[in-house]
Amino acid sequence: MKKMIATAGLVAVLVGSAAASQTTQSLDRRILPIAEPEAVHSTILDARHATPPPRFLVDAPEGAPNVLIILVDDMGFGMPSAFGGPVHMPTVEKLAGEGLRYNEFHTTALCSPTRAALLTGRNHHMNNMGSITETATAFPGDTGQRPNNIAPLAEVLRLNGYSTAMFGKSHETAAWEVSPSGPTDRWPTRSGFDEFYGFIGGEADQWSPSLFHGMNRIPTPHYPGYHLMTDMTNQAITWMKFQKSLTPRKPFFIYFAPGATHAPHHVSPEWIAKYKGKFDEGWDKLREETLRRQIELGVVPAGTKLAAKPEAIKDWDRLSPDEKKLFSHQMEVYAAFGEYADHEIGRLLDALKETGQSDNTLVFYILGDNGTSAEGGMNGMFNEYTYFNGVQETVQDMLRHYNEWGGASTYPHMAAGWAVAGDTPFTWTKQVASNYGGTRNGLVISWPGHLAETRVVRSQWHHVIDIAPTILEAANLPQPTSVNGVVQEPIEGVSMVYTFKKATSPSTHKIQYFEIFGNRGIYSDGWFAGTIHKAPWEAKPRGDLENDKWELYDTRSDFSLSSDVASSNPKKLKEMQDLFMREAIKYRVLPIDDRMLERTNAALVGRPDLMGDRTTLVLGAGMNGLTENTFINTKNRSFTITADLDIPKGGAKGVILAQGGRFGGWSLYLKDGRPTYCYNFLGLHQYVISSPKALSAGKVTVRMEFAYDGGGLGKGGVATLFVNGSKVASGRIEQTQPFAFSADETAGVGEDDATPVSADYSEGEDTFTGQIGKVAIEVKALGSGAAQEKLGQADATLKKAASD
């Protein structure tokens, strides 16, 4: 009997040893998750006489580094000081002194597509991210939903023994999936990140953001001095220190994606003061000075010409004194925002040193997910959402907000002339995938002990899809062939590790297509061809896709794309155009959809709509955080809100139901116990209708009926309040917002999240103090053909706004 026990124990030990060997030496990391070895069932009765097998663990490969990706938002090649620009960024300059500067690194020209490509190593159309999530369509390549056969980098690293975390901007989840009903497959914490703290949409109010922690909407912080940039940095530092305290040998992957420097440009006065007067000479002079510095730094070759700026951008010398005053201050605020963000990133890098992790961390500091944004139009704006609603702000309107620009009472963007200057030495900007002004971004890589030299420039041509394979090679990890049971599309990027060793190594990324909203281009081994189909400030494309005029550049001798050689090289141009079509077919770029406003209409483009054609939505207490894409649409129609309330003795106050915030929205609430409805038109005017009497204690039904004027978009109407069926107040609302309230603010019951719609209550002081039974919103159906009529009218509105 003892012999049998000993033999069985020996078998268990041998099998356990084999499992341990597999764990540490010969794991097949091509198929993820790595299969756990089959457990051997013991035949020994008494555990004291048995030897347990080693526990199966998946560790990262020996020597695998921590990885930190920093991605700044809406900052072009000519903005950061590390690449000759006017925005002082000492953190990235210091990092460049310890690492490598890349001056031929490219993005996709738009945020969601760049982020999808960065986090997967595949082209953005292969991620179904042909544009931003809010303009997805029904065609493969543009559905806004990352396919299962493209696993995110975070998931690959997590399944290989990394701790993973994301802080800041996501904008990678389909717009109709951002609700408590999900599906949550493409939320950050279901996309490989153990931790997520940030915002899901394309932008955030930095003073009062709508935040998620994991998959939970959390209350907006309202303490004095709060700013999201500092908050997310604190969160990242805390998480990183926690990881290294509990599991010091386990590497981490942090994706740190600030909302800076995307609009709204929010930063405190002390940072703005640093740039007082620095842009008074204007954007034309800034372009010249930036190019001079770029050449001195060696990030632009000597002899590079300054490409012509777009015809729509006025010469600075022709502007009025008021225009110069306003526009220079807009740039002061933008630059301050950029420096402040870099300062906070510096705190994160300092924390790496404090925990002893700097020498084992591979850092990618990517200075922009696209070129600088020209979406501010010719004048900029006090409230970015005036643009999205076809309302033109004048210089005089904006000058009234001069002293508060960048503060919590503004939601600002800057004039497009600064975007062009921020993309020096190129012509174009964000959205223009057919010019390096839209796609060329500065990149700094640092990895102590693994770079042959530092403080130098690398000029190999690379693209954002090359970051993921670079990380895998650095960590000695193979590209997986199967993840979570799904066979994977091969990674389309190429590793940049070869550039760490030799400056003269030829580029390995030979061909790359570009396409955003019909602006399209193609790179091939030193040549670049592209067509400007639509400028960011233009309401409609310049012509049909079939008839676009293409340009051709020899980038080997023309860094800035200043000399179009298409007319003298028709054969080469045709070769490049044919190559674009082959790549477009290969990577699901076709069909190209150059529509803009129409793509925000889900029904028209075949995108799912959580509400569909529903005309009624019933909510209850605590149902908050509903984004504009997951809440019933009350715009351009009549609607009714009916709320069942229970008022305590002594009365009640607070919000019953609200949507939007300080820069546009509406709210039904009790003010001193009196039912009140406020419609906030773009932060420009508040229409308030209020009952003269407070509600008595007990159960009560409050109803608000809005009778829309009709006859087009953004019209007014009459709001009427009822208590238990009796009319108590009525008033006129002269204007309504036709297209959007916010990409950040939400709708909810019992509170007005983030910023307040109404001046009648303050941030954090809006919670309803009675009880809410249910709240029903009923909208009038648009009727047959109304969607087409709506789009036609919207098109006309935007055309007029553009012409103005």
Image (cartoon, rainbow, N blue to C red):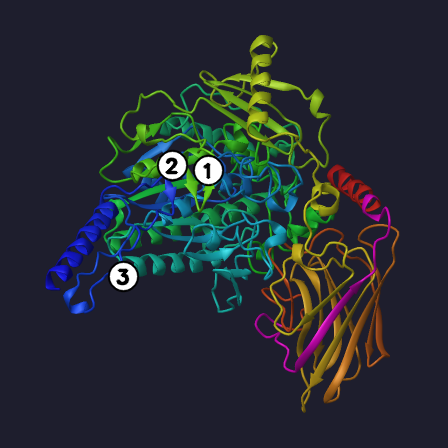
Locate the N terminus and report the quarter of the image it occupies. Answer: bottom left
- In the rendered structure, find residue 479 and report the number of the disc placed on it: 2
- In the rendered structure, find residue 488 and report the number of the disc placed on it: 1
User: Disc 3 residue type?
Assistant: Leu
Identified at 35% across, 28% down, the residue is: 458
- Choose between 324 and 18: the one closer to the eye: 18
Quarter assignment of residue 235: bottom left
Quarter assignment of residue 673: bottom right
- In the rendered structure, find residue 246 and report the number of the disc placed on it: 3
User: Disc 2 residue type?
Assistant: Gln
- Residue 152, can we see it? yes
Query: Is residue 164 part of the magenta span, yes or no?
Result: no
Which secondary structure lies at badge 2? loop
- Choose between 26 and 473: the one closer to the eye: 26
Query: Nearer the N terminus, badge 3 or badge 1?
Result: 3
Disc number lying in front (2 or 1): 1
Identified at 80% across, 57% down, the residue is: 735
| Image: magenta residue range | 762-788
